[in-house]
Image (cartoon, helix red, strand yellow):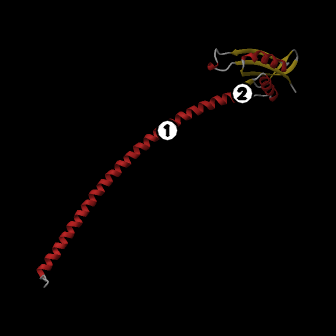
């Protein structure tokens, strides 16, 4: 079997055909890559836009939630500051109030006192401290609590006593609110 040897023209035709095929294959691959790049670029732009919208929406929601939480915390802080801004001057007065309440199975829920004010009563120089307290618990113990508290402070005047007794326990806890002036000697 004899192999055919291409002539000059044959080689030129083979080389030209091979180059043409290679150029066509590379051209097809190139345009496929360009088309794929365009699709990926478009998908990337859409994804990026979606992410930005989600981020903005999340941030707006988070901002609103944080503002609401800040308002609630600020409101609670204001309440606590209101309760704490009035000084309780005498630890003895405070201890006596809590001890008497505990002995009657009651709980001191709120208490404030004024700064001592110098006063003269029947020629005697005294300090007057006004104590206001809200005590909660069994309403059957309220009267004895007030009497016992008054007995512990021989130099006191009960200015007012209010009892809050709800019709049923779901409406709140029974409470006694009292205001008294306690006189102490100047030292």
Residue annotated with mark 1: 63
Q: CA distance from mark 1 to mark 2?
A: 35 Å
Q: In the rendered view, would you say 115 is above or below 5? A: above
Q: Which type of secondary structure does the marked residue at label 2 adopt?
A: loop
Few, some or many residues within 10 Å of mark 2 (<14, 14–19, 20+): few
Residue at coordinates 35% horizontally, 52% vertically from top-left? 44
Q: In the rendered view, would you say 3 is above or below 159? A: below
Whichever of labels 1 and 2 marks the residue nearer the N terminus, that label is 1
* Quarter in which the C terminus is drawn: top right
Numbered tag placed on residue 125 in the rendering: none
Nearest to the eye among marks 1 and 2: give it. 1
Residue at coordinates 24% horizontally, 60% vertically from top-left? 31
Q: What residue occupies the far front of the structure in this picture? A: 1
Q: Quadrant of residue 30?
A: bottom left
Q: What residue occupies the far bottom of the structure in this picture? A: 2
Residue annotated with mark 2: 86
Q: Is residue 73 visible?
A: yes
Report x, y in % for residue 2: 13, 85
Report x, y in % for residue 162: 71, 15
Few, some or many residues within 10 Å of mark 1 (<14, 14–19, 20+): few
In the rendered structure, are the residues bearing label 1 and label 2 in contact, judged by CB atoms less than 8 Å apart?
no
Report x, y in % for residue 47: 37, 48
Residue at coordinates 74% horizontally, 14% vertically from top-left? 160
> In the image shown, does 52 or 164 lie closer to the viewer?
164
């Amino acid at each position: 079997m004899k192999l055919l040897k291409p002539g000059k023209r044959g080689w030129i035709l083979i080389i030209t055909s091979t180059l043409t095929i290679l150029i066509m294959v590379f051209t097809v691959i190139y345009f496929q890559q360009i088309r794929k790049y365009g699709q990926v670029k478009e998908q990337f732009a859409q994804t990026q836009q979606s992410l930005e919208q989600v981020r903005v929406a999340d941030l707006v929601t988070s901002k609103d939630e944080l503002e609401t939480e800040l308002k609630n915390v600020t409101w609670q802080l204001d309440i606590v500051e209101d309760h704490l801004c009035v000084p309780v001057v005498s630890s003895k007065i405070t201890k006596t109030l809590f001890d008497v309440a505990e002995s009657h199975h009651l709980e001191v829920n709120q208490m404030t006192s004024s700064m001592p004010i110098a006063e003269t009563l029947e020629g005697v120089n005294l300090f007057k401290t006004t104590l206001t307290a809200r005590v909660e618990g069994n309403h059957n113990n309220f009267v004895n609590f007030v009497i016992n508290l008054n007995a512990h402070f021989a130099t006191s005047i009960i200015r007012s006593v209010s009892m809050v007794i709800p019709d049923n326990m779901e409406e709140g806890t029974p409470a006694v609110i009292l205001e008294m002036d306690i006189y102490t000697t100047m030292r």
